[in-house]
Image (cartoon, rainbow, N blue to C red):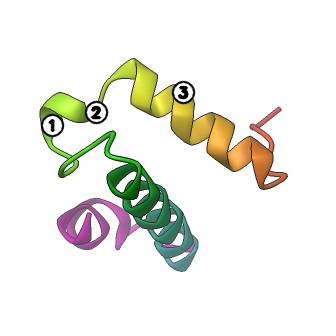
Amino acid sequence: MADWLKHHVANLAAPDRYVYSIDQWIAFFEEERRLGRVKGPTVMELTPDLQMRFRTWRAKAGVGGHR
């Protein structure tokens, strides 16, 4: 994620807002590891099911999608 921020986000408008997104993914992965659902996460674990769990996790926090 640090490489993604450095190489892909740094030149975008308002790159700082992406740091918050990374913080949310890290918190989610920590919970997933605590629950025994992921080990890494590894690339193999980045499944549509994991992504759905992330969206559900964010929705429970009151965050909605783009419209």
User: Distance from label 2 to label 3 (Cα)?
Assistant: 10 Å
Image location (x, y in percent) of residue 6: 24, 73
Q: Residue at label 1?
A: 43
Residue type pointed to by label 3: Met
Of the numbered discs 2 and 3, the one sitting upstream in the chain is 2
Residue at image position (48%, 71%) is 23
Residue type pointed to by label 2: Leu
In the image, is residue 14 above or below residue 60? below
Q: Which mark is residue 52?
A: 3
> In the image shown, does 39 or 66 lie closer to the viewer?
39
Q: Residues within 10 Å of mark 3 (few under 14, many from 20)?
A: few
Q: Which mark is residue 30?
A: none
Image location (x, y in percent) of residue 64: 80, 42
In the image, is residue 5 above or below residue 43? below
Of the numbered discs 1 and 3, the one sitting upstream in the chain is 1
Q: Which contiguous range is marked in magenta?
A: 1-15
Q: Is residue 9 left or right of 8 when viewed as pictured? A: right
Callouts 2 and 3 close, C-beta under 8 Å: no
Callouts 2 and 1 close, C-beta under 8 Å: yes
Q: Residue at label 2?
A: 46
